[in-house]
Amino acid sequence: MKSAIPETGVPITPPAAGNGSDRQEASLHGEVLLRLRDYVVEGNIPEGARVPERQLCEMLGISRTPLREALKVLAAEGLIELLPNRGARVRQLSQRDLEELFDVMAGLESLAGRLACEAITDEEIAAIERLHYEMYGHYLHRDMHGYFQINQQIHESIVAAARNETLKATYANFAGRIRRVRYSANFARKRQRWGEAMREHEAILDALRRRAGSELSDILFQHLRNKRSAAIDHLAEGPDTGLETTPQGD
Amino acid sequence: MKSAIPETGVPITPPAAGNGSDRQEASLHGEVLLRLRDYVVEGNIPEGARVPERQLCEMLGISRTPLREALKVLAAEGLIELLPNRGARVRQLSQRDLEELFDVMAGLESLAGRLACEAITDEEIAAIERLHYEMYGHYLHRDMHGYFQINQQIHESIVAAARNETLKATYANFAGRIRRVRYSANFARKRQRWGEAMREHEAILDALRRRAGSELSDILFQHLRNKRSAAIDHLAEGPDTGLETTPQGD
DNA sequence: AAGCGCCATTTTGCATTCATTTTTTGTCTT
DNA sequence: AAGACAAAAAATGAATGCAAAATGGCGCTT
């Protein structure tokens, strides 16, 4: 019995207990869903690894019914896949899958930019500008971790400015799928892309200030497309060289 | 006991029976999922209506376990919503929700157009041209039904040409959510939009022939945006006037 | 007669149990 | 010793059972 799951037997906090995390979810299956999703996204389960329900039940301290409900949802979200009679496995993403995901993400951000131009306030733009300069600081200090942190915040700000909850939820879903790969592959952006990306970000800000919707849409798509190439290339080459590090990013 | 569901007690065909529809799905919950999704999308359940599990079980001839699994998935897909301890109801879409959905659809089609330009073959373009002329015929004959049928095929062809299964699946999901509203509201496009839409379609074809990705992206977004206005306006005014008819369409 | 509160019924949420299917293990044959 | 077959063990899929919450109805109060 080789368990694919590293033992972190932390049972679900009883519903009554003060929920440390502020997201309350009365039902058990809801709680399980949130926990399992994070667990998978954070890469705690190896790709394609078999995940016996029983083991997850013990780990979460629940019965199989709510667990199976959560698994079905995760499968619908594209994080895992359910082979009939053969259990759930973490979805293995081919290179092609990743390319597709990146392109859809690019499309969503592109849309977000276009919509943002219709509704964004000057204050929001100012906030993004501040983030931009903060990121520039990280860039100058060669602080990749800080850089990607801010980078992600910028992109999320744009999505938020689009004023479209449906888009936001969809974006979050795809971001999760990709993040899962990031965590496990621990891949980095190329150094050489750094300066380029900074310039692109300036163009993004510029278009945003001018509320140039379709222009921003174009820039964002290309920006993400470039990232896609870098990321995919890196994955194809194999994991980290040790020269660059990154925990997560945009 | 007022049932929200019109009685169409057609139990699920036993797994052994020759599956008339070619989509085979061994597991019961999978079958239930497909059936229920169609059932909801086709508008058989009134908006916001309460749907007792028991009743659905009888209708489908199964026990509650697989049904509940299917409900969770449908909730994740956004078709229904599950209130804790208070059952499932068909998701009620506010006007704002619809606007958001249309915008996301516009973004997805816009992306599809952009990607399609990278990979579409001359044959595929020729096929779309044929559809276009066929649609033009329906337009001349004032045949709205035929018109929308072909219209939908055109948009689906573009999505198919994008060569992105992830995008295609996401597109299908949102299309389902919107179609549900279409079925129940039975709303129509304005007559006045017809000519305009035809012109836009010609521009789409033109950009596609030139493989002008970002241009096509722009045109498609605007095209869908215009439709959005027409559709939302119509919904706001209230259902059909009787002058125009439409079963479904893009 | 209208409003409020209590109790019965229904319904949901989860655990447990049962039936298949898959996987593993052990043995036998060659 | 290697491969194949068969039986045992385990895992999945679905149904049933049980506790808690919600809905509805009834009587009571004012």
Image (spheres, coloured by chain):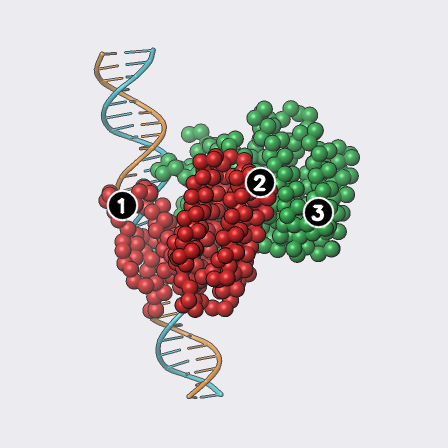
Chain colours: A green, B red, C orange, D cyan
- Which residue is drawn at the image coordinates 27% and 44% (left, top)? B19
Disc 3 versus disc 1: distance between alpha carbons? 54 Å
Q: Sort mark 3 into few (<14), some (14-19) or many (20+) by Cα contacts within 10 Å.
A: many
Foreground residue, B210 or B80? B210
Q: Is residue B248 above or below residue A194?
A: below
Q: Given the image, what chain letter belongs to the residue carrying mark 2? A: B
Q: Is residue A7 above or below residue A111?
A: above
**Dot 3: what SS?**
helix
Which image quadrant is residue C26 in?
A: top left
Element assignment for label 2: helix
Label at residue B213: 2
In this view, the residue in front, C17 or B218, is: B218
Give the percent coordinates (x, y) of residue B139: 43, 55
What chain does badge 3 belong to? A
- At x 75% / y 37%, what residue is drawn? A138
Residue B61 image offset from top left, x and y in percent:
28, 53
Query: Chain under label 1?
Result: B
> Which label lies toward us, 3 or 1?
3
Q: Number of marks in the image?
A: 3
- Tell me how far mark 1 sits from mark 2, CA to CA: 41 Å
Q: Name the spot of residue B115 as percent of width and height, x first.
A: 54, 39
**Residue A3, horizontal then vertical, whole percent:** 46, 32
- Name the residue that disc number 1 marks: B20
Q: Nearer the viewer, residue B169 or B224?
A: B224
Q: Is B74 displayed left or right of A156 in the figure?
A: left
Residue name at image x 61 percent, y 55 percent:
A163
Residue drawn at (54%, 35%) of the image: B118
Numbered label attached to residue A207: 3
Callout 2 amino acid: Gly
Determine contact: label 1, label 2, CB under 8 Å: no
